[in-house]
Image (tube, rainbow, N blue to C red):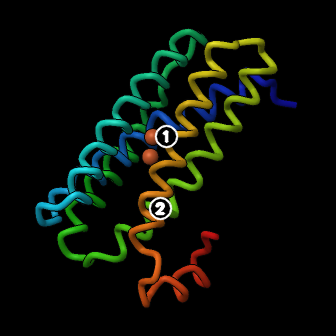
Amino acid sequence: MTSARQNLIRILQNAHAGECAAAYAYRGHWRSLKDSPEKDRIKEIEAEEWDHRRRVGEWLLKLGAKPKLIREKIFWTIGNLLGPSCFLSGWFMPMYFAGRLESQNSVEYEEAAKCASELGMHDCVADLIDMARIEEEHETFFHQIVIGHRLLPVMKRVFGWS
Ligand SMILES: [Fe+2]
Ligand SMILES: [Fe+2]
């Protein structure tokens, strides 16, 4: 059976790499958009993902763990492929998949917070819950953008996202 500590480290390692992919993907995303409030918000979201990565890295360090190098490389590549693809994939797809992924991010930080709570790491719990809340804000932002779009019902049927 894996311990809460092992679980927490695993989730944080995944998040550390995932935040890098997200940040680069958002960088490409906002750069592909015309000047607009949406563009400004996605720029801000990129900065928030870098901030999450920094905070997650600090918790890994406190747990005596490190990011997983191979995963970091894979997710760096994913982010740097997704970012530029936003120039080609049209307006809807990056917005939809961003929202879809954000809904998973908040769940992962909540899972991590449960593990930290089992370990009695109260500051860590508070920080993880704060990050889960920010991921929920990101999800809400993208959801509000795509709501009512003609492609949304079919995408939800295929890829999910309530
Ligand atoms: Fe994040
Ligand atoms: Fe996010």
Which residue bears the numbered disc 1?
134
Q: Is mark 1 within 8 Å of ligand 1?
A: yes
Which residue bears the numbered disc 2?
99
Q: Quadrant of residue 97?
A: bottom left
* Mark 2 residue type: Gly
* Mark 1 residue type: Ile
The quarter of the rendered structure image containing the C terminus is: bottom right
Judge whether 130 appears above or below 105 on screen: above
Q: Along the horizontal axis of the image, is 39 left or right of 17?
A: left
* Mark 2 burial class by Cα count in 10 Å: few <14, some 14-19, many 20+: many
Judge whether 153 appears above or below 55 on screen: below
Q: Where residue 71 sits: x, y (%)? A: 46, 40
Numbered marks: total: 2
Task: Using the rendered image of the protein, determine whether residue 71 is visible from the camera's viewpoint.
Answer: no
Q: Of residues 132 and 101, which is closer to you in this image? A: 132
Residue at the location (11% across, 61% down)? 35
Q: Of residues 25 and 92, which is closer to you in this image? A: 92
Judge whether 42 appears above or below 51 on screen: below
Q: Along the horizontal axis of the image, is 23 left or right of 137?
A: left
Q: Residue furthest right?
A: 1
Q: Where residue 108 sits: x, y (%)? A: 63, 42
Judge whether 44 appears above or below 5 on screen: below
Helix, strand or loop at label 1? It is: helix
The quarter of the rendered structure image containing the N terminus is: top right
Q: Along the horizontal axis of the image, is 108 left or right of 61?
A: right
Query: How far apart are labels 1 and 2 at the CA level?
Result: 13 Å
Task: Using the rendered image of the protein, determine whether residue 134 is visible from the camera's viewpoint.
Answer: yes
Q: Where residue 121 sits: x, y (%)? A: 70, 12
Q: Given this view, does label 1 or label 2 mark the residue nearer the observer?
A: 1
Residue at the location (26% across, 60% down)? 38
